[in-house]
Image (cartoon, helix red, strand yellow):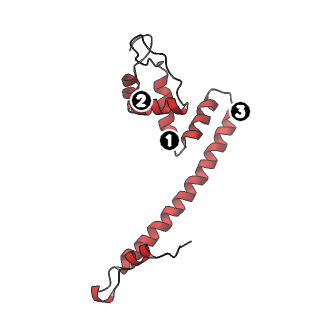
Amino acid sequence: MPENGLRSGQVADAAGVNVQTLRYYERLGLLAEPPRTGSGYRLYPVETVETVRFVKRAQELGFTLDDVQELLHLAEGGPADCDTARDLAQARIGVLESKIDGLIRMRGSLVELVTTCERPQAARRCPLLRALHSDRREP
């Protein structure tokens, strides 16, 4: 690794992302725009790899990129910031639980529709297709 920094490809490889992801994170302000070499190559500080890994781990836990930006800021702070991070995590848990509930309802509806397809062909009109055509909204 060069002493003065890492090129985009090196950071991307070490962090397990592609170069476009680095540029996207720069545009969002998750990564500071790195200085460039005389030939125009971006030279990231070595710590950038850990920052990108932090972002990816947070996303894997369901945090949005807005949440991640706040978490990155909190990671620079002191022990009191743990309370704020906990609050963010608790809010994210609520969002995930809501999504899980919705997915369980969708799965149940699909299972019910698929089981009705087991009727004799002459005695059925596909409820799956009828349900998809229906204007009726299920709660």
- The alpha-carbon separation of the residues under discs 3 and 2 comes to 29 Å
Vertical relation: 67 (above or below) 131 = above
Judge by depth and name the residue closer to the eye, 41 or 117. Answer: 41
- Which is closer to the viewer, label 3 or label 2? 2
Q: Which residue is mark 3?
A: 80
Q: Amino acid at mark 3?
A: Ala
What crowding class fits label 1: few (fewer than 14 Cα within 10 Å), some (14-19), or many (20 or more)?
some
- The dot on residue 15 is 2
Q: Amino acid at mark 2?
A: Ala
- The alpha-carbon separation of the residues under discs 1 and 2 comes to 14 Å
- Which badge, 3 or 1, is on the more N-terminal residue? 1
Vertical relation: 3 (above or below) 124 = above
Estimate the x, y position of residue 3 in percent, counting from the top left.
43, 10
Estimate the x, y position of residue 50 in percent, counting from the top left.
48, 27
Q: Secondary structure at mark 3?
A: loop
Q: Which residue is mark 1?
A: 59
